[in-house]
Image: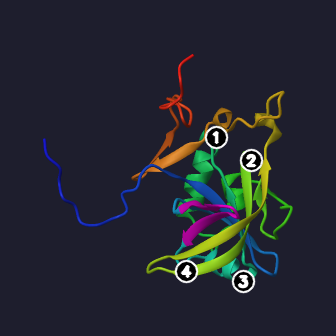
Amino acid sequence: MGKQNWKPGNMLYPIPAVLVSVADKNGRTNVFTASWVGTVCSDPPMVSVSVRPERYSYHMIEETGEFVVNLTTKRLTRAADYCGVRSGRDENKWERAGLTPIKGTKVLAPCVKESPVNIECRVARKIALGTHDMFIGTVEAVLVDEAYMDEKNTFHLEKADPVIYSHGTYYGLGEAIGKFGFSVKRKR
């Protein structure tokens, strides 16, 4: 079997499907689903989210310079999908998706209470790229759900059943196959 040559496209899968929450200066909020998100830098901690300028939430990010990346779980998959196919211009997606906005600690944008991890960000740079603009955000705060902490105060995201997105389908994560550095670790 050989390889087929396809036209250039975004085939970097799987990717996270996160809920991004935003607010404008008048206090209106929205939540939308994004898969074009990623880690940008570890020091200072930075993440990115790419948004089409015509999207309802775009002006909110531009206006306040803030957003929150909320990780999704198996339990949140229906809400994440809903927030990705409906517009906040037409309805209150918080209510319709059964999500609870809670006050962030460092930014005006709310956090999703049901999410195991909320990453509060302040825009450091916006880059116009074509169909999407990328907002690079400096991480101002990270909130984690204490339900996933153990007795040693270690956070276990895997117990929240995180999900990924691959070419139109949501998936749960499978079994762990190794920890960082396992390929070179000496056997005792």
Label 2 sits on a secondary structure element that is loop
Q: Of marks 2 and 1, which one's residue comes earlier in the chain?
A: 1
Label 3 near label 1: C-beta < 8 Å? no
- Give the CA separation, mark 2 to mark 3: 26 Å
Q: Of marks 4 and 2, which one's residue comes earlier in the chain?
A: 2
Task: Please indicate, yes or no, whether residue 90 appears anywhere in the rendered image.
Answer: no
- Give the CA separation, mark 3 to mark 4: 15 Å
Seen at 60% across and 55% down, the residue is 18
Mark identifier at residue 75: 1
- Magenta span includes 7: no
- Mark 3 closeness class: few <14, some 14–19, many ≥20 residues within 10 Å: few
Quadrant assignment for the N terminus: top left
- Magenta span includes 40: yes
Residue hosting label 2: 114
| Circle 1 or circle 4, nearest the eye | 4
Seen at 59% across and 53% down, the residue is 80
